Image (cartoon, helix red, strand yellow):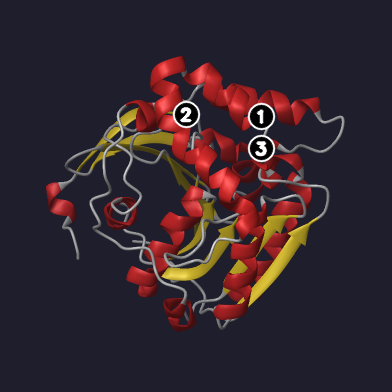
Amino acid sequence: MRRTILLVTALVLSVGSAGAAQTRALDVGDARISYDLKGRGRTVVFIHGWTHNKTVWDDQVAVFSKRYRVLRYDSRGFGNSTGFADESAEPLDLLVLLEALRIDRAYIVGHSRGGGVALRFAAAYPDKVDGLVLYGAAPPADFPYPPESAESGRLFGSLPAIAKQHGLDSVWKLLLTTELAWVPPGRTDVTERYRKLWLSYSGKDLLEPHPESGKVPLPSTARLSTLRMPTLVIIGDHEMAFLAAAADTFAHRIPNVKKVVIPNAGHGTHFAQATAFNGALLDFFSDVDRTKKPLARKKKK
């Protein structure tokens, strides 16, 4: 399904100083998507996870914008984007965003829930993807969850009711008891970053849940073998059990794949161990870059 950018209006909300990221918003019909763009070269898209927003990628923008054009955005219903959370509609949001910015292809990096969005996008629009990074990513549609993850599944399923009855603070306290909140010993900076991200989270998807539209389905396990783009699967060595199992499935089923495990890191590897995380992505992108044709340069008038 293809949307025309003629029906989309880009609104410049704020523009930074020279060399800084430009923060804008794009009207996609039933939501307005907040995004920013910085750097030059091949495009890298960063898609954040649940409860987060585009600022979670600050450490990556600082590094990658020196070699690439970095695009990050708030998913619908999160951060400064409007609309209701709908993981199945978000690949279309990204498609419209790329078309509006006249970006033909990009590296797509998705974290956690955003990994599910990246996977859906890659399966639906493979010709738009130079390389795929599934980082602590949600599993495929028919994933056989391991028995030890059942308790976590019940906990996460109860969060909307807890948020409505007891407030978001109670949800936060519960999340702190799960593997999701693991941080390296002594890293109070990581805990504080999680806390600030939580304070910026509206909880709209829990307090006003809407069913998925089903616009772009999550691929099945069997469908993974049809993905031909270069793929990096990356996790921390203290990742949640079912996400670690999902990473193994991706690494086993996707043909052109590399898997990297970052030591002493959990679900927030990209800021807990930013140097190692960034290095793994840069190595992956560099390997893929070497197989690509040089970007065409515009002729000077």
Q: How far is disc 2 from disc 1 in space, using C-alphas? A: 35 Å
Q: Point out residue 120 in the picture as x, y percentages from the top left corner.
A: 39, 63
Q: Quadrant of residue 181?
A: top right
Q: Amino acid at mark 1?
A: Leu
- The residue that mark 3 highlights is 178
Give the residue at x 31% y 45%: 86
Q: Amino acid at mark 2?
A: Gly
Q: Quadrant of residue 170?
A: top right
- Which tag is nearer the camera, tag 2 or tag 3? 3
- The residue that mark 2 highlights is 16
- The residue that mark 1 highlights is 176
Of callouts 2 and 1, the N-terminal one: 2
Q: How far is disc 1 from disc 3 in space, using C-alphas? A: 6 Å
Asked whether 70 or 145 is in front, the reply is: 145
Query: Taking the image as drawn, is residue 109 in sight?
Result: yes
Asked whether 62 or 167 is in front, the reply is: 167
How packed is label 1: few (under 14 Cα within 10 Å), some, or many (20 or more)?
A: some
- Quadrant containing the C terminus is bottom left
Give the residue at x 45% y 24%: 162
